[in-house]
């Protein structure tokens, strides 16, 4: 019985240590699978992919890829979401719809610049909404992130 308690204690410590490994700095140091920026959002990671800096328009693409903390795809069938984009003093919101195994996509009017900030909110079927904040180009040219 003591061995079982020791095993559970070791697993709890490992799980707690893993939770700290997913902060923004750690995620910025990782290569995102789809070329975006990753953030932790509850039990998932969101990867935000937006138009390159210097692009502006009325129908620019936005994609959010959803994975678990181990990098496995999380199904998004039945999910809903939004991305609120802030750039050049303007705010716009893009609705997201499932567009594949683990990706939600939408398009909208925004200017993609180095100052771009985004708030992603996704509600997976049967789960509460989870949010993450992004600055996809904040580290461009520094060797960190994008």
Image: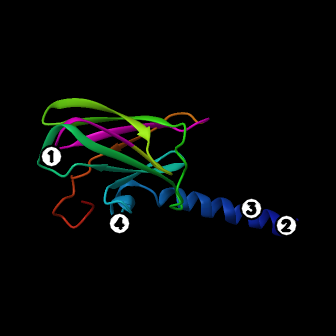
Could you tell me which residue is drawn at 82 percent across and 69 percent down?
A: 3
Asked if residue 61 is positioned above or below residue 143 in the image, the reply reads above
CB within 8 Å, label 4 to label 1: no
From the image, which quarter does the C terminus lie in? bottom left
* Distance Cα–Cα, label 4 vs label 3: 32 Å
**Nearer the camera: disc 3 or disc 1:** 1
Q: Residue 112 in magenta?
A: yes
Sequence-wise first label, 2 or 4: 2
Q: CA distance from mark 4 to mark 1?
A: 21 Å
> On the image, numbered disc 3 is attached to which residue?
8
How far apart in space, not on screen, are marks 3 and 1 (Cα)?
A: 47 Å
Mark 3 vs 2, N-terminal side = 2
- Say which of marks 4 and 3 sits in front: 4
- Upstream in sequence: badge 3 or badge 1: 3
Relative to 101, is 4 on the left or the right?
A: right
Q: Which mark, by number, is residue 113?
A: 1
Q: Secondary structure at mark 2?
A: helix
Question: Residue 25: within the magenta?
Answer: no
Marks 2 and 4 sit apart, C-alpha to C-alpha, by 41 Å
Q: Main secondary structure of the magenta part?
A: strand
Name the residue tied to disc 2.
Answer: 2
Question: Which residue is located at x 34 percent, y 65 percent?
Answer: 29
Q: Nearer the viewer, residue 80 or 129?
A: 80
Question: In the rendered structure, which disc, 1 or 2, sits on the residue that comes first in sequence?
Answer: 2
Nearest the camera: 104 or 131? 104
Residue at numbered disc 4: 31
């Amino acid at each position: 019985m003591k061995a079982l308690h020791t095993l559970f204690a070791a697993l709890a410590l490992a799980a707690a240590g893993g939770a700290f490994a997913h902060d923004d700095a750690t995620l910025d140091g990782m290569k995102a699978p789809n070329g975006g920026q990753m953030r932790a959002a509850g039990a998932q990671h969101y990867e935000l992919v937006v138009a390159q800096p210097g692009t502006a328009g009325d129908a620019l693409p936005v994609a959010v890829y959803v994975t678990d903390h181990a990098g496995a795809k999380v199904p998004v069938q039945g999910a809903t979401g939004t991305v609120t984009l802030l750039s050049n003093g303007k705010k716009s919101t893009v609705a997201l719809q499932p567009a594949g195994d683990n990706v939600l996509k939408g398009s909208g009017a925004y200017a993609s610049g180095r100052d771009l900030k985004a708030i992603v909110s996704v509600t997976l079927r049967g789960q509460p909404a989870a949010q993450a904040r992004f600055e996809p180009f904040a580290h461009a040219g520094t060797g960190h992130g994008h």
